[in-house]
Structure formats: structure tokens, C-alpha cells
Image: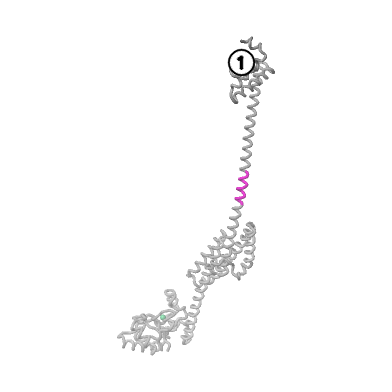
Amino acid sequence: MRAASRGSHAAPRRLRAPAGRSTAGRHSAATVAGGDGIAALGAVLRSVPGTPRQLVVTSVVFWAIAGGMFSGHEVAAHRHAVAAEARRHAVVAEQAQIASDDVHTLDRMADASRRHESARILVSNRQAMFDTAGRAQKVVLAASTLATGTVDAFDDPQLPADLPPDLAGLDEALARVRDALAAQDAVTARALVGDMEQRVLAAAQTHASTAAERIVTDVAVVPDDQHAVVVGDMVARVQQAAAVIDVVGAAQAAVSADGAATAVAQAASVERARVASSAATARSGVDRGAWGGNVNGKIPVSALSSPTFDPKVKLRDDAARALDRLNTAFRAKFGRDVVVGDSYRSLAAQFSTKEQRPTLAAAPGTSNHGWGLAVDLTGGIDDAASAQHRWMDAHAGEFGWVNPDWAKAERFEPWHWEYVG
Ligand SMILES: [Zn+2]
């Protein structure tokens, strides 16, 4: 069959179609069985799939080159050096990363710190502004209190139009504070308010000490007046409030001290008027009662007389006679004598009586008892509501005896009767 095939020139054309149909398989198998080694390696390599195949190729090439450059232990040493270098690079890279992270962290921290500080300053500044505005308002209220003299003037935060001399110019200072606050200048505003506070506190202290000075002479007149105690308390409170820069508290206490001092002055004024009136009454009594060149409370017993119904009673003679006539009429009405507790009173006795009854007895040397022209009656007449007293009111005057007006009002002494002739 081979000889027949080569012998024919037309065989390729003739055989091409049959070979394409029936002999192609046999021809291919013969070619592979007789091929070279590279093709076989290629086939092997192609049979290794994907990345592992490339790895194998790389390894083969690397070790082929390495094998050409180094021999034996040199290759092993180089491999160690390469590995060490790689590890060193890894460590350095890792440290660089860490360092980089640290830097970023520090940057972030610094940034946060800066932002925090800005926020803190802002908050602090806002708080300072707020505090300063509040303090300024307190100054206004305190100044208003001092200016108007009343602790009830806290509805209006405006300064009064006419400030007292010690607070003059406070309105201008307040305007500057408002400007500073509007300009966000807390430091200036705070300083200005501090000055205003000091001025108001000084004014409150002046008010308080003036109040304390005012009552010094008044207290001597009304030593038991409770308002004097209030003045003392309020002066102490002003000092305490000033120590802690409590301007409103200081102003309130100063105004209270002022009010209490005024009350003390009024009480002293009333007492002085009463004493003056009393003295005038006493003086008029002295003048009216003086007789026979005698000294009040130092009349010789021999110069005095007694009514017939009671020899212990000592009076000027005409007064004793008139009392006798009165007693006759009284006895006719009530069936008994008038009871006389006291009549002429010596100066020594008057001093003693004044000690025992300080608010009732007249000043020694001024009483009509000292002239032998007054009696103190008991036995019912000393009771203003009794029948005896009412009878005396209606009829004693017929005998020249009266219960004086002052004994019915200014001092209530229904028992005290004077001879007016
Ligand atoms: Zn009397």
C-alpha cells in the first residue's frame, strides 16, 4: 500500500479527499509520537491551569537563572539575605504606618483640643457676658432702691432720673456697660460693672452709717424703741452684704436701716413732745399753784390745814375748807366720808413716788401735791365708771375741786383731784 501511494504524482490530490475523510486520525497520531521535548513541556505546562501555571513558569525561570549565577551554598545564603531584607522592609513599613497613624491621631487630638478650647472660650465669654449683664442689672436695682428709698422699687430695672449725689454719673457708666456688651467686650463690661458695684456698695454703707448716727441722740430719748435694734441689725447686714459684693442685699439693708432710723426719730419726736407738754403743764401748775412764798414740796406743816373729817390730810387752808364742804355733800349722797389716799406731798415723798410710779407721778418739784392743792381719792372715786366718780364729776366743781383734763386723757388718773378755787 505504501509503494502504490508514493508512485502516483496525483496521489496528493487523489488522496487529499480520502485522507480528509478516512486517514487523518492515523496521520496525526504518527506526528505526536515522533515530536520534540519542548512541545511536550508546553503541553505539560498548558495542562497546568491559571496562576499555578505561571508560578511554575516563574519558578522554573528563576531557578534556571539563579542556578546559572550561583552554585550550592551561595544560593541558600542569598535566599536568606533576601528574606531578611524583606522582613526588615516589612517592619519599617509597619513602623512607618504606626508613626503615620500616631501623627494623625495627634493631629486630630490637637485639632479637637483647639476646637474644644475655642468652644470653651466662647462659652466662657458668653457666660461672662451673661454674668456681667446680670450684675449690671443688679446694680441698677440696688441704685434704684437707694435713690427711691424703698425696697419695693424692683419692678423697674431703669435707673431713676434723679440719682442722689453719691450715685451721680451711674447712668453714664451703665450706658458704657451696654456698649461694651453690645461689642462683645466682656472684659471691659465686667470692669465697668465692678466699679459700679463698688460705688453702690459705698453708697449703701454711707446710708447705713448715717442712719446709725441719726439715732444716737434719739435712742437716749426712746431707749426701748425696737426700731433702734433694727437699725443696728441692718447696719451689720450692709457690712456683710458689702463683703460678698451683694449690692442688692446691701441696698435693701441700707434702706431698711434708713426706714428704721426714721421710725426711731418719729418715736423720739413724739416722746419729746409729750415731755415738753408735760413740762409745760407742770410749769403752769407750778405757777398757778405757787402761794405764800413757799417752795413746792417744802411747805411747813404749820402752814397747812386739815379737813375736819380726816386730820391726816394736809392742804392749803382754803382747799381744806372746800374739801370739807364737798365731803358734807358726798356723805349726804353716799352715807360715808370721802377717802383721801394722799394730799400734800413733800419733795422727798414726790421723789419716792416718782421712783415707784415713773410714768404717772409728775416730775418732783412740779406737782400740785407739793403745793397742798391736790388729793388722790379712793373708795370708789378712783374708778372712773363708779357712781361716786360720776357724782364727783357732776358736783366737785361746785366746791372748787376738779379732776383735770390731763388726768382724763394724757395720763389717766381718775383719783387725782385739784383745788382750783
Ligand atoms: Zn395726785
**Which quadrant of the view contains residue 216?**
bottom right
**Which quadrant of the figure contains the C terminus?**
bottom left
Q: Main secondary structure of the magenta part?
A: helix
Q: Which residues are magenta?
A: 110-121
**Could you say where residue 97 lies in the image, as x and y percent from the top left?**
63, 34
**Could you say where residue 205 lies in the image, as x and y percent from the top left?**
58, 64
Q: Is residue 79 above or below residue 300?
A: above
**Which quadrant of the figure contains the N terminus?**
top right
- Looking at the image, the residue that sits furthest to the left is 335
Q: Quadrant of ligand 1?
A: bottom left
In the image, 47 versus 92, the foreground residue is 47
Q: Amino acid at mark 1?
A: His
- Looking at the image, the residue that sits furthest to the right is 69
Left or right of 358, for residue 191: right
Is residue 114 part of the magenta span, yes or no?
Answer: yes
Question: For numbered disc 1, what is the local secondary structure?
Answer: helix
Q: Residue at x 49, y 72 (%)?
A: 222
Q: Which residue is mark 1?
A: 27
